[in-house]
């Protein structure tokens, strides 16, 4: 295995300076010193970092900042450049992934019960600590994922959030074996979750406003692809709402068959209209949210992705154009997943 060059003394990156509409330029170029890894931390030379809609929510202020001028990015693929004290699972040169969940308390009832995603003291990459929109990033060893050394970093990056949270959303949707799944919105996370569902024998119907996304859905094996507000061609056993559009909640609920489940996958959602009990919830329809993920979700999904050969559609951007990548994401101009790469 080739050992990466030592990290330089300074690095370039991007930080959210003043949150606001993407047209106001909330993401600005920064130049900072390279951080030294603390106890239990890995310093990574970033090979690729996915651009997630959560990064857009942070930049635009939909999610309030937890600290000033934070570097976003939580789909990080990199090579270990330096080890903090006490690190024992990784060595310099290893290919490692850093994801959204960065730390939990380990002692609350949620952590003890296998639901660390609900830990009230959880912290997140690119929100509570600097993320991967930079040349280097720090990742806690306990929350890092070992990644294959021989695969394209740009295609691995979206697996680390879009893939993992899509996997959790799919499980939260309670899709029965051989069931009928509706997917509302078809970006980075949705196009990966759809492939898991298809590999497990589901019939998938995609509802999205983007013509390019509808083409991608059909190419991946969806049974149908229509506009976001269309009625699918058959009642659904389960549905996942990936688009951050509250108006689609009643639309998706109406498309469910009796006892169907709708899982809302986003960390942010515009206001949900008033629901009518008879039309939207009666006949034991369920409405569920999805909150972050556990590390076990990550391990399960990455193993499954390798096993079924998930195809990751990426739109690469050089790190120097991170602001353009966020703007394209805001305008739904990204096909698949946007990924920042060095250069």
Image (cartoon, helix red, strand yellow):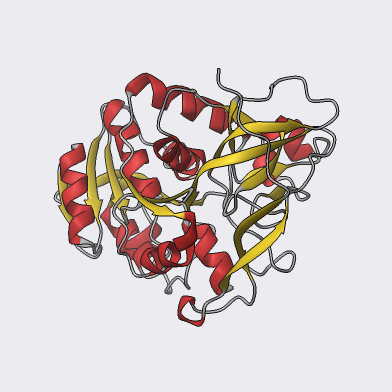
The image quadrant of residue 321 is bottom left
The mark total stands at 0
Q: Can you say which quadrant of the picture contains the N terminus? A: top right
Q: Residue at x 33, y 30 (%)?
A: 310
In this orientation, does residue 232 appear? no
Q: Position of residue 315 (x, y in %)?
A: 33, 51
The image quadrant of residue 61 is bottom right
Using the image as rendered, state which of residue 123 and residue 11 is in the foreground.
11
| Image position of 233 (left or right of 252) | left
In this orientation, does residue 332 appear? yes
298 is higher (above) or lower (below) than 14: above
| Image position of 165 (left or right of 34) | left
Residue farthest bottom in this picture = 24
Q: Position of residue 108 (x, y in %)?
A: 81, 40
Q: Position of residue 211 (x, y in %)?
A: 17, 60
Q: Residue at x 41, y 66 (%)?
A: 324
Q: Position of residue 272 (x, y in %)?
A: 45, 70
Q: Residue at x 63, y 77 (%)?
A: 18
Using the image as rendered, state which of residue 61 and residue 82 is in the foreground.
82
| Image position of 220 (left or right of 316) | left
Using the image as rendered, state which of residue 325 and residue 290 is in the foreground.
325
Q: Residue at x 68, y 25 (%)?
A: 92
113 is higher (above) or lower (below) than 226: above
160 is higher (above) or lower (below) than 343: above
């Amino acid at each position: 295995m080739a050992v990466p060059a030592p990290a330089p003394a300074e690095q370039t990156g991007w930080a959210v300076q003043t949150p606001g509409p993407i047209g106001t330029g909330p993401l600005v170029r920064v130049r900072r010193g390279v951080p030294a890894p603390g106890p239990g931390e890995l310093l990574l030379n970033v090979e690729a970092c996915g651009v997630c809609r959560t990064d857009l929510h942070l930049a635009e202020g939909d999610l309030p900042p937890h600290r000033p001028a934070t570097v976003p990015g939580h789909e990080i693929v990199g090579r270990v450049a330096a080890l903090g004290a006490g690190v024992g699972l990784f060595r310099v040169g290893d290919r490692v992934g850093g994801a959204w969940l960065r730390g939990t308390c380990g002692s609350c009832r949620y952590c003890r019960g296998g639901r660390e995603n609900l830990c009230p003291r959880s912290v997140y990459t690119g929100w509570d600590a600097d993320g991967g929109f930079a040349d280097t990033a720090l990742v806690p060893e306990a929350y890092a994922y070992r990644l294959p050394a021989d695969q394209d970093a740009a295609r691995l990056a979206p697996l680390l959030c879009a893939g993992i949270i899509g996997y959790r959303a799919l499980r939260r949707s309670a899709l029965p074996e051989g069931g009928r799944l509706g997917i509302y919105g078809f970006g980075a996370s949705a196009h990966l979750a759809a492939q898991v569902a298809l590999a497990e024998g589901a019939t998938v119907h995609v509802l999205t406003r983007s013509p390019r996304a509808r083409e991608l859905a059909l190419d991946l094996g969806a049974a149908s692809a229509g506009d976001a507000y269309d009625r699918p061609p058959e009642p659904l056993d389960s549905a996942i709402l990936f688009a951050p559009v509250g108006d689609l909640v009643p639309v998706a609920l109406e498309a469910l068959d009796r006892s169907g489940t709708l899982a809302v996958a986003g960390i942010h959602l515009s206001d949900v209209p008033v629901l009518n009990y008879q039309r939207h919830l009666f006949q034991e329809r369920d409405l569920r949210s999805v909150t972050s993920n556990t590390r076990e979700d990550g391990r399960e999904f990455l193993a499954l992705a390798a096993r079924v050969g998930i195809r990751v559609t990426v739109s690469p951007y050089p790190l120097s154009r991170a602001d353009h990548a966020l703007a394209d994401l805001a305008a739904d101009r990204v096909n698949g997943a946007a990924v920042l790469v060095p250069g």
